[in-house]
Image (cartoon, rainbow, N blue to C red):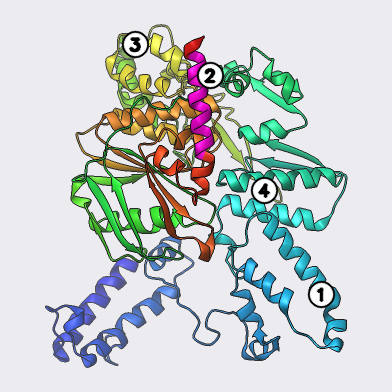
Amino acid sequence: MEQAHYRSHLASLKRAAKSSNIRLDVPWSKLTDEEKRVILNGDGDSYDGIYGFFQWLERKKYKVHIRVFLSRYRGYQTCPDCNGTRLRREARDVQVGGYTIDRICGLTVRDVGEYFATIQLSDREKTIAEKVLREITRRLTFLENVGLTYLTLDRLSSTLSGGEAQRISLATALGSALVGTLYVLDEPSIGLHPRDNLRLIDILRQLRDQGNTVLVVEHDADMIRVADEVIDLGLGAGEQGGRIVYAGAFEGLLREQRSLTAKYMRDDLAIPIPAARRKTNPKQMLKVIGAKEHNLKGANVDIPLGLFTVVTGVSGSGKSTLVHDVIYAAIKRAKGDWDRRVGRLDRLEGTELISDVVLVDQQPIGRTPRSNPVTYLKAFDPIRDLFASTKDARMRGLTPSHFSFNVPGGRCEACEGEGQVRVEMQFLADVFVPCDQCDGKRFRPQVLEVKYKGRSVHEVLDLTVREALAFFGASPKVLRRLHVLDEIGLGYLRLGQPATTLSGGEAQRIKIASHLVSQSGERMLYILDEPTTGLHFDDIAKLLTAFKKLLQAGHSLLVIEHNLDVIKTADWIIDLGPEGGDAGGAIVAVGTPEDVARVQASYTGQHLAAVLAASRNAAAMSDRS
């Protein structure tokens, strides 16, 4: 029905154009005002205009596909009446100390603190506002303590990073002054520069000293060192994990020989500094000139191609703005694959030197249990071919598609190949239970009866990657894809493990593996944002191995990162700052890690200098022993 209405609308436009002498063979910009008016508003007869067409669509919004269609043509503009303040005129006319409430909300936490510290009030006004001012100052102090002085008070919560949102929650917890409360934090150091991480540790200590219990899931070495109690799980990942390796004080952890964490804390294992860093080539540069988006102050940035480049800086310094809003969006637009806004910049040079840009994030590789590592890597295609080539499969007339749980045929239709069924709860979260038809095996009985080397397709999907490498030793097509997973530390994953059960770090490494197995001779720029999120020291070492393979294949890496073990292994560093918010957005230091470590104005350089010195000392002691 919608298609018929669209065709009727288009025919009406052509008739109106003919009767009103509207040119249909010239760009919109060259049409006269009268021609544009008729096209937009209609001719008052048989043609309703584009606005009329969209008004008709608005009446059909109860249909999902109509809402999707409308979303492509919907934008947001600042309200002309309140100018984005969301307050009516009467509220914006009230002043305190010469400032209206909307002007105060537009200030940063730092500036608001200075305003209330220096506000001039009469004795009567001070008496009225004393308690209110004390509470405002107290709450602003908490935000300052968690390092969020660069945020404006009217900043939308949807624009905050995960680390910023978590620190605001911590500031709220400090302000509530609760005692006897258990606080559970999962990776609170996400997105934090080493300098800001020290502030976070102080906040957690304050919560503890108030009489609370603080339980933190964390891999950060500084936080592990200051913990009152350390619980270390292992010994490895997957089936090799799930055991309490150590529980006790940090000093005792260092003496635990079985702990992989302890080996890195003792420097028995370490991520080494590269013996030689890759050299920059002046002719192989991606040049960003005059980046002015958000707090960026006309930044000029050269990104060497074929190298491992890390963008660093304190929280709020403009890293994500530069990499996501400017570089990634501008390259995509240059390649003709971007219809959204691009961050402000004068120009971008060197895009012809790369084939494309890829953002490798930690989003799930799929949203249903049918998505898993082997389907994402396309390793399941040759596995299905092997099953279809067996004698039993040919006798039953089974093709490779019968061994897929993504299409009808061989899959269990009761659960549609998911192995589990969703039970909708009226007032609670939905519950997933194993399918009672296939008992969670995803396939019909006739398909499960087919064996390859004594295993059914369900039993093969239940193998770990390492087990599968031995099982498929005679199948190079399968081995090539699975071997990459093992090399980057994911050998413990099961082939058919649902994507919904994978961590963000695991999903990201699977995406890297997919690019490693699908080399096409192109030169890609891979962008990663905080790839060490949720990763142990040993996982970081394996991630760096995957990076090395991408670089060896001729690609380039641009990574936003705060982890000093990753930063010290980079070929090139771009450090933003010096602070966050309005005090950031400038290039503080550029060069190799050794170059940046010598820049005193760089907070990254200050912490990096200590790490480089410690790594060299550890390497020297290892050589002597």
Nearer the observer: mark 1 or 3; the answer is: 1
Q: Residues within 10 Å of mark 4 (few under 14, many from 20)?
A: some
Residues at discs 3 and 2 in contact (Cβ within 8 Å): no
- State the separation of the CA atoms marked 1 and 3: 80 Å
Indicate which disc, 4 or 1, sits on the residue closer to the N terminus: 1
In the image, 241: left or right of 253? left
Q: Is residue 438 above or below residue 214?
A: above
**Residue 534 placement (x, y as % from top left):** 56, 35
Counting residues from the N terminus, which is met first, the one under dot 2 or under dot 4? 4
Crowding at dot 1, Cα within 10 Å, few <14 / some 14-19 / many 20+, comes out as few
Which residue is under mark 4? 199
Q: CA distance from mark 2 to mark 1?
A: 54 Å
Which mark is on residue 132? Answer: 1
Q: Comparing marks 4 and 1, which lies closer to the viewer?
A: 4
Percent across and percent down for residue 66 are 41, 65
Disc 3: which residue: 392
Q: Is residue 314 left or right of residue 275?
A: right
Determine which residue is flagged by label 2. 269
Are the residues flagged by discs 4 and 3 in contact, CB closer than 8 Å?
A: no
Residue reaching furthest to the top: 454
Q: Quadrant of residue 135?
A: bottom right
Per the image, label 1 sits on a secondary structure element best described as helix
Q: Position of residue 34 (x, y in %)?
A: 23, 93
Bounds of the magenta segment: 608-622
Residue 564 part of the magenta-drawn span: no
Q: Work out whether mark 4 precedes mark 3 in sequence or the reverse, and give the earlier one.
A: 4
Q: Earlier in the sequence, mark 3 or mark 2?
A: 2
Does residue 130 appear to the left or right of 551 in the view shown? right
Q: Quadrant of residue 591?
A: top left
The label number, if any, that marks residue 607 in the structure image: none
